[in-house]
Image: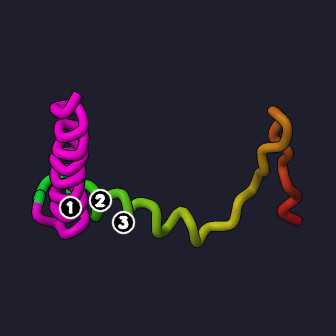
Amino acid sequence: MQQETVARPVLYATVATAAGILVVGVGGGLIGPVRQRWERMLTTAAPRTSRPRTSLPRGGRTIFLDEG
């Protein structure tokens, strides 16, 4: 019974440490390919957000807006 009460906090601490390293590594740009992928996605998304939509999805149907 004593082992179980010690093992669980050690397991949680190990998992939290690994998750923290992963978050800092990805968020801080330490992993080059992930950073390049994020930059590419953001570069692609920027022009799309400034364009007005010509149609709006609604309840499974697409409603086209008049442009005139």
Mark 1 is surrounded, within 10 Å at the Cα level, by few (under 14), some (14 to 19) or many (20 or more) other residues, namely some
Instruction: Say if the magenta span includes residue 45.
Output: no
- Disc 3 on helix, strand or loop? helix
Instruction: Say if the magenta span includes residue 15.
Output: yes
Please, is residue 6 above or below residue 17 in the view?
above
Mark 3 is surrounded, within 10 Å at the Cα level, by few (under 14), some (14 to 19) or many (20 or more) other residues, namely few
Residue occupying the point 78% across, 50% down: 56
Marked residue nearer the N-terminal end (2 or 3):
2
Residue 43 numbered tag: 3
Q: Are marks 2 and 1 in contact (CB under 8 Å)?
A: yes
Instruction: State how far apart marks 1 and 3 are (Cα).
Output: 12 Å
Residue occupying the point 24% across, 59% down: 23
Residue occupying the point 24% across, 52% down: 16
Instruction: State how far apart marks 2 and 3 are (Cα).
Output: 8 Å
- Tell me the kind of residue under disc 1: Arg
In the image, farthest residue toward the front: 2
Could you tell me residue 37's position as x and y percent?
Answer: 25, 54
Mark 2 is surrounded, within 10 Å at the Cα level, by few (under 14), some (14 to 19) or many (20 or more) other residues, namely some
Could you tell me residue 47's position as x and y percent?
Answer: 49, 68
Residue 9 numbered tag: none
Q: Which residue is mark 2?
A: 38
Q: Is residue 36 visible?
A: no
Q: Which residues are magenta?
A: 1-30
